[in-house]
């Protein structure tokens, strides 16, 4: 049907036909290219530089850098998970560190059991408590698959139960944020107690063996780094799929006009609960990858300040975009690693200042600034 | 015998949209029953806020397919009446029926929507960050449970429905535009379009042409006139010119009850209406 392109306002109801726009591509070509480049860097370039290039060479990647980069990739996963609930559904969590730590603890339990199986020694905290048997809830954690399942299921279940009551009672905004903060604080106090059976304030450490391979070697660091990179890429694709689906668009709608969503016949509860639980599971996996790379998991990971920092990475990178939180987590943590060595006392001031500046002048973070710049300069 | 019973009950439960014939004397037909020609019936509704009587023994009947305009000075109870119908406010006394069988006073907001009543608020509320077509797609009458939305794709028929409504609300060349970037009048239209996607039997429209240009108001009048018959419309509006264009029947509210009812000429000739509007 040919319609003359002129006469803009002459659209008598039958003149111009409505044409729905086809959905945009899952990722634009440059997006696929970036993802491919990222995977090549993680899976090919980094292992080659770390394992094949000899120690003396300038190109050699030291184990310190591999471990640091792997740790930052785990933070990026948490920021991505945070962004799905905050950036898309408008739910600000100040307790995401809890889900991350629980994933880490589940993996730490396996690593402790593997150490005990290999050396015959019980973990330090059990010797200290004069326990000769693992508590009942350590049952089965000697199996890697079960520990990994716990790393995903425990944060997921906790988030589901907590979220169900919070969202059903229509707790929103700052009230919700404060409750999540209290939740992670309460968990931290619980895990600090020696009687809880997770190593008290020392947490779980002394990791020696993972799936039969020694922990602490270059090969193990590279393997965990690659696993973290692949997990991050997988989570990114999952998040992209979710926010593009009708489910994801309902989330955005809930963020912008919840009453209208209800008057469209949706029950916001299940949408919020779904994304909230998925986000917690993602954090759990990130924590499970984090513990063996850092070599320790302790209750300080549940401290409220840690969870607030996750929100800051997300805000600085740009919430409501998927690449933003990843950029934010990487940039902030890279500068933290550098600055806490160079000027340790300045770091907290810088982080706080950066957060204020971003909130005031760049509500969509670094990615938002970049998009603005692109709009202005073609 | 028993088997037959079971079969019929099952058939009735799973029948298309509850349109199955109700064959048993005391078994109430599910869904909306408008066989007596009345879409909405309010009877003796009273609502008080802290001693202030917002609605006072309000009785009102709206016929199926009617386009009814409700006018009245500020504080006459127009918005409170809509709140009662949509389950937002519970009246102190009285009854509210949707069709013959649906007792509106027993339903929550979402159930009122599911029963077939759509409401447009005074201030246009659309999903600003989504495209115009996404706004309509989200409103589309379909299974709204969360897990059904994960893999949802528009069927050909549903696409045509979205396109049809896009044309109806004159936003056919704005489908991909961000809803937040629309003009005020276009947002009003988009919200009306979202109501139409829900395919409600009864539309409640609170000041739908506020903030529209004259041309937009005229188009809206045309739209509403074309909707009447297929849908039942209740319009609260201050713009008398607009009311004159669309109304077949006008109800004047004053101090929470009906002061006059009839064609616009009739109510404008009514002495008490003149008194209320112009002061004594």
Image (tube, coloured by chain):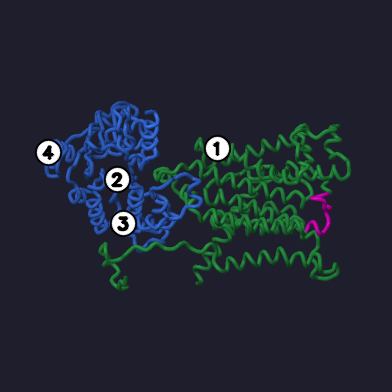
Q: Are marks 3 and 1 in contact (CB under 8 Å)?
A: no
Magenta-tinted stretch: A209-221
Looking at the colours in the rendered structure, which chain would you say is drawn in green? A
Q: Are marks 1 and 2 on the same chain?
A: no
Which residue appears at 17% of the width and 43% of the height? B249
Q: Nearer the viewer, mark 4 or mark 3?
A: 3
Residue A21 lies in what quarter of the image?
bottom left
Q: Quadrant of the C terminus of chain B?
A: top left
Residue drawn at point x = 47 percent, y = 44 percent:
B145
- Residue occupied by mark 3: B169
N-term mark: 4 or 3: 3
SS category of the residue bearing label 2: strand
Figure check: A246 above or below B34? below
Label 1 with label 2: CB-CB less than 8 Å = no
Chain letter matching colour blue: B
Labels 3, 2: one chain? yes
Sequence-first tag of 3 and 2:
3
Badge 2: few (under 14), some or many (20 or more) residues near its Cα, within 10 Å? many
- Disc 1 designates what residue? A164
């Amino acid at each position: 049907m040919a319609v003359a392109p002129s006469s803009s306002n002459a659209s008598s109801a039958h003149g111009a036909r409505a044409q729905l726009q086809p959905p945009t591509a899952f990722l634009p070509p440059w997006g696929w290219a970036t993802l491919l480049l990222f995977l090549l860097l993680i899976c090919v370039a980094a292992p080659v530089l770390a394992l094949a290039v000899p120690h003396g060479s300038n190109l050699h990647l030291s184990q310190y850098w591999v471990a640091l980069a792997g740790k930052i990739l785990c933070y990026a996963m948490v920021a991505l998970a945070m962004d799905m609930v905050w950036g898309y559904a408008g739910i600000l969590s100040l307790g995401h560190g809890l889900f991350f730590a629980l994933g880490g603890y589940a993996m730490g339990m396996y690593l402790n059991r593997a150490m005990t199986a290999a050396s015959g020694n019980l973990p330090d905290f059990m010797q200290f408590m004069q326990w000769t048997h693992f508590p009942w809830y350590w049952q089965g954690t000697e199996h890697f698959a079960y520990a990994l399942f716990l790393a995903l299921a425990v944060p997921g279940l906790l988030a589901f139960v907590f979220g169900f009551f919070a969202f059903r009672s229509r707790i929103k905004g700052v009230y919700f944020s404060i409750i999540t903060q209290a939740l992670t604080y309460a968990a931290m106090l619980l895990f600090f107690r020696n009687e809880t059976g997770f190593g008290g304030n020392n947490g779980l450490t002394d990791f020696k063996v993972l799936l039969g391979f020694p922990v602490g070697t270059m090969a193990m660091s590279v393997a965990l780094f690659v696993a973290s990179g692949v997990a991050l890429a997988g989570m990114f694709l999952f998040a992209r799929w979710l926010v593009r689906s009708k489910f994801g668009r309902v989330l955005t709608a809930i963020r912008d006009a919840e009453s209208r969503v209800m008057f469209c016949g949706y029950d916001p509860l299940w949408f919020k609960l779904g994304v909230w639980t998925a986000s917690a599971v993602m954090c759990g996996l990130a924590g499970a990858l984090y513990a063996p790379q850092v070599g320790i998991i302790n209750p300080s990971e549940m401290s409220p300040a840690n969870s607030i920092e996750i929100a800051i990475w997300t805000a600085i990178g740009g919430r409501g975009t998927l690449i933003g939180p990843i950029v934010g987590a990487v940039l902030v943590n890279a500068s933290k690693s550098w600055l806490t060595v160079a000027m340790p006392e300045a770091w907290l001031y810088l982080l706080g200042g950066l957060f204020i500046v971003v909130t005031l002048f760049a509500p969509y973070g670094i990615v938002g600034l970049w998009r603005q710049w692109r709009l202005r300069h073609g | 015998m028993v088997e037959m019973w079971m079969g019929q009950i099952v058939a009735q439960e799973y029948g298309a949209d509850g349109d199955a014939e109700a064959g048993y004397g005391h078994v109430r037909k599910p869904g909306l029953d408008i066989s007596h020609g009345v879409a909405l019936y309010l009877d003796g509704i009273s609502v008080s806020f802290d001693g202030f009587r917002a609605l006072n023994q309000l009785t009102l009947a709206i016929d199926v397919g009617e386009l009814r305009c409700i006018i009245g000075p500020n504080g006459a109870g127009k918005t409170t009446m809509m709140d009662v119908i949509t389950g937002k406010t519970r009246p102190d006394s009285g009854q509210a029926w949707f069709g013959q069988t649906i007792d509106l006073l027993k339903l929550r907001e979402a159930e009122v929507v599911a029963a077939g009543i759509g409401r447009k608020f005074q201030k246009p509320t659309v999903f600003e960050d989504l495209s115009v077509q996404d706004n309509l797609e989200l409103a589309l009458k379909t299974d709204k449970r969360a897990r059904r939305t994960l893999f949802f794709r528009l069927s050909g028929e549903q696409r045509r429905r979205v396109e049809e409504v896009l044309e109806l609300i004159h936003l056919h060349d704005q489908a991909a535009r961000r809803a937040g970037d629309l003009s005020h009048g276009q947002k009003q239209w988009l919200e009306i379009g979202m109501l139409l996607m829900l395919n409600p039997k009864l539309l409640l429209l609170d000041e739908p042409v506020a903030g529209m240009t004259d041309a937009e108001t005229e188009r809206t009048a045309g739209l509403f006139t074309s909707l009447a018959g297929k849908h039942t419309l209740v319009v609260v509006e201050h713009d008398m010119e607009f009311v004159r264009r669309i109304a077949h029947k006008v109800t004047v509210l004053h101090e929470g009850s009906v002061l006059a009812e009839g064609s616009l000429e009739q109510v404008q000739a009514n002495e008490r209406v003149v008194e209320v509007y112009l002061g004594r």
